[in-house]
Image (tube, rainbow, N blue to C red):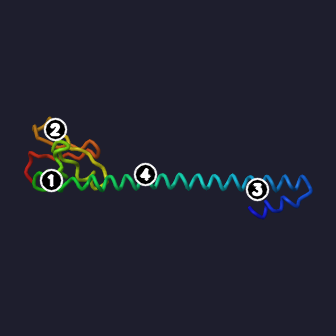
Amino acid sequence: MLDLAKSLKGINDATVRNTVAIELTEKIIAAHAAQAALISKVADLEKELVRFETWEAEKQRYDLHEIKKGRFTRRLKESVEGSEPPHHICAQCYNRGVKSILQSKVSEVGRNTLLVCGECKTELNLSLAV
C-alpha cells in the first residue's frame, strides 16, 4: 500500500494516477473492513469469556444431589441459600452450562410427583422406586 502511495507522487498521467488512487482506496477500505471484523470477533470472544466466567461462579453454588435413588439434580448449597429460596436445577442442563430450575408437577396418570425441567423437558419421577 505504501508503494502505491509513493508512486502517486511521481505520476504525471491523470488516468494512471486516478487508477492507482482508486486501487489504493480499495485497499484502504478492505483493510478497514478486516479491522472491523477483527474488532467484532474480539468483542464476541470477550462476551463469551464473561459468560463462561459468570457460569463458572454460578455453578460453584450447586452440589450434586441424589434426590431419589438413581435420580440426580444439582441443589443450591445451604451456605448460599440466604439470597434465594432452596431449589434444584436440572443436572443435564447444568452440564451444558444452563441453569434451569426444576418445577414440581403432579402427573395426571398415577398422580406421581415429578420434577420437570422447562429447558430440556427432563422429568424426574419422585414417586416410583428404582
| Disc on the earlier residue, 4 or 2 | 4
According to the image, label 4 marks what residue?
47
According to the image, label 3 marks what residue?
24
According to the image, label 1 marks what residue?
71
SS label for mark 1 = strand
The kind of residue tagged 3 is: Leu
Q: Give the number of the mark in front: 1 or 4.
A: 4
Question: Badge 3 local density, few (<14 within 10 Å), some, or many (20+)?
Answer: some
Q: Nearer the viewer, residue 101 or 55?
A: 55
Q: Nearer the viewer, residue 78 or 100?
A: 78
Residue at the right extreme? Answer: 13
SS label for mark 3 = helix
* Circles 3 and 2 in contact, beta carbons < 8 Å: no
| Disc on the earlier residue, 4 or 3 | 3
Q: Residue at x 84, y 52 (%)?
A: 18
The Cα atoms of the two marked residues, 4 and 2, are separated by: 36 Å
The kind of residue tagged 1 is: Arg
Measured as percent of width and height from the top left, residue 94 is found at 26, 53
The Cα atoms of the two marked residues, 1 and 4, are separated by: 34 Å
The Cα atoms of the two marked residues, 4 and 3, are separated by: 35 Å
The kind of residue tagged 2 is: Lys
According to the image, label 2 marks what residue?
105
- In-image side of 7 versus 59 (left or right): right
The Cα atoms of the two marked residues, 3 and 2, are separated by: 67 Å
| Disc on the earlier residue, 1 or 4 | 4
* Circles 4 and 3 in contact, beta carbons < 8 Å: no
SS label for mark 2 = strand
Q: Give the number of the mark in front: 4 or 2.
A: 4
Whether 107 is drawn above or below 38: the answer is: above
